Image (cartoon, rainbow, N blue to C red):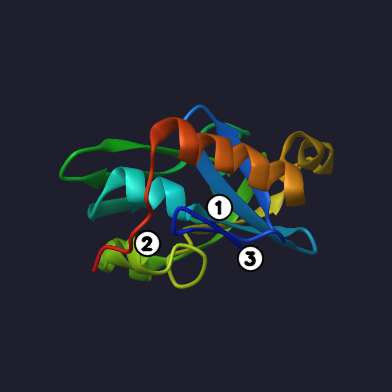
Amino acid sequence: MVVESNCEVPEDLYYYIEGKNTVWGKLEGDVMTVGITDVAQTMAGKLVKVRLKKKGVKVDRGRPVATMESGKWAGAVPSPVSGEIVEVNEEVEKSPSLVNQDPYGKGWLVKLKVLNREELKQLYTSSVAVDKVRGLIQSEKIQCKRVT
């Protein structure tokens, strides 16, 4: 785990980074657990609403798996890979602040069955991912904090 400006960046995950969108994925077999990063939850602020796509829905890489709202932001969470949603975290729909409190744990969003393993090569990993996130933290002058 790398910590930069109070932001946690686990080195063992895949990262989809497009502009200010930073989404993580953890691959176990053919299933990827997806969530937003510590940086993303900090930039969004205290989340008040999370809507997840339904189980069984197929999504293309870069298309939304969820939408979120906070007092200062509303937006979509892009899928890091093309896949079929096999599980959704209903707890974050009931308690959106779980994403703020534990973005890499209890705040996960969906689990996808990966449909195109070639797309994994387009994601950032290990030190490259950390450098990319570090650059965003510095350019946006972000200091991460957990909102309760």
- What is the residue that sits farthest to the top in this orientation? 19
Query: Does 59 sit above or below residue 41?
Result: above
Residue 1 is tagged as: 3
Residue occupied by mark 2: 99
Residue furthest left in the image: 71
Considering the numbered disc 2 on the image, is that residue within a helix, a strand or a loop? helix
Residue name at image x 63 percent, y 54 percent: 25
Which of 73/9 is in front? Answer: 9
Residue 59 seen anywhere in this rendered image of the structure: no
Q: Looking at the image, which is closer to me, 83 or 141? A: 141
Determine the CA span between mark 3 and mark 2.
18 Å
Q: Specify whether 21 is left or right of 42.
A: right
Q: Earlier in the sequence, mark 1 or mark 2?
A: 1
Spot occupied by residue 18 in the image (x, y as percentages of width and height): 55, 29
Disc 3 is placed on an element classified as: loop
Q: Amino acid at mark 1?
A: Gly
Camera-near label (1 vs 2) is 2
- Which of the two discs, 3 and 1, labels the residue nearer the N terminus? 3
Q: Position of residue 57 (x, y in %)?
A: 53, 46
Q: Position of residue 80 (x, y in %)?
A: 62, 41
Rendered residue at 63%/61% (across/down): 10
Marks 3 and 1, how far apart at CA: 33 Å
Are the two marked residues, 3 and 2, in contact with CB atoms closer than 8 angstroms?
no
Q: Amino acid at mark 3?
A: Met
* Residue ID for mark 1: 56
Snapshot quadrant of residue 32: bottom right
Q: Residue 75, located in which quarter of the rendered image?
A: top left
Residue at the spot 23% in from the left edge and 69% down from the top edge: 148
> Where residue 110 sits: x, y (%)?
52, 58
